[in-house]
Image: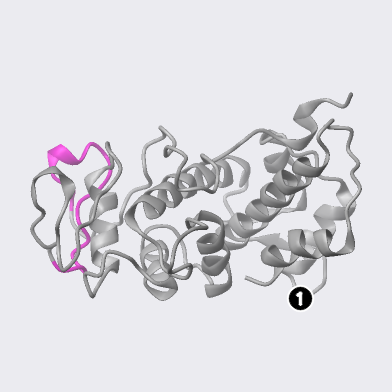
Amino acid sequence: MADYNRYGHSYGGGYSSHTPPPSAPPAPVPTTSAPPPSSYGYGGYPSAYPPPPPQAAGGFGYGFVPVAFPPGTHPDVERAFRAADRDCSGAIDEHELQGALSTAYHRFSIRTVRLLTFLFNDPASSSPSRMGPAQFVSLWNCLGQWRGIFDRYDRDRSGKIDSRELTEALRSLGYAVPPSVIELLIANYNNGVPRNGALDFDNFVECGMIVKGLTEKFKEKDTRYTGSATLTYDGFLSMVIPFIVP
């Protein structure tokens, strides 16, 4: 029987909103002024955003609909969600999510945002293109962990991950991706040319999520963890297409 670690361990708390968010602290929300002493290094509220609406006791009821954040959600993450939820509907669409993530982390393409929405949204949601507070918190914390991995392996501090750094980063997560696949991944974000290509944080997240997601889907078929599985044509397309056509 093959070693389970060949597939990699679960990282980032999974994709489902039913999974508790990781214990790692959330990434900071940028601020243009010095944070108050009570911020504990997370930064203050961005001056570009209006003050958040008042919140009722217990974390419910701001704006037009009741909104509940998971217990222990950092106030800065709540503020980021409220700032993105301009219409106070209790959910944010892909463009609002793009704005929130781009402000806090890095400029995210709408393609990456759509993939993240697909991966983190509740499959039973009546609005699959909109994200609620629980899913937003799970995604936010997960991206904080991916940011830590990116910074750790961007050893030359170029702001990009090259093929060697990408291989090491994925291996640190338990994914032994062969060089031929690494070249395909790099080429996908470099106009089809793998040589001297590199990924910024946006592309690194998308690439990592695809590797993780497809690995998890493959493991469902490879129940003995042998590294091989039998798939029907329909099953193969159903597994792959959601990750490449977000």
Question: Horizontal placement of 234 versus 72: left or right?
Answer: right
Question: Horizontal placement of 50 versus 115: left or right?
Answer: left
Quadrant (top left/top right/bottom left/bottom right) for the C terminus: bottom right
Quadrant (top left/top right/bottom left/bottom right) for the N terminus: top right
Q: Residue at x 20, y 56 (%)?
A: 45
Q: Nearer the viewer, residue 46 or 216?
A: 216
Residue indicated by mark 1: 191
Q: Nearer the viewer, residue 115 or 63?
A: 63
Q: Nearer the viewer, residue 18 or 23?
A: 18
Residue 39 appears at what percent x and percent y? 19, 41
**Residue 99, placed above or below residue 153:** below
Binning the other alpha carbons within 10 Å of mark 1 as few (below 14), some (14 to 19) or many (20 upward) gives few
Question: What colouring style does the render use?
Answer: one colour
Question: Horizontal placement of 230 versus 50: left or right?
Answer: right
Q: Nearer the viewer, residue 59 or 189?
A: 59
Q: Residue at x 66, y 36 (%)?
A: 173
Q: How many marks?
A: 1
Say what amino acid the circle numbered 1 marks: Asn
Q: Quadrant of residue 204?
A: bottom right
Residue 105 appears at what percent x and percent y? 43, 57
Question: Horizontal placement of 52 versus 145: left or right?
Answer: left
Residue 95 lies within the magenta run: no
**Residue 190, placed above or below residue 56:** below
Q: Main secondary structure of the magenta part?
A: loop
Q: Quadrant of residue 36?
A: top left
Secondary structure beneath disc 1?
A: loop
**Residue 26, placed above or below residue 93:** above
Q: Residue at x 24, y 73 (%)?
A: 86
Q: Which residues are magenta?
A: 34-50
Residue 201 appears at what percent x and percent y? 56, 57
Q: Residue at x 81, y 59 (%)?
A: 235
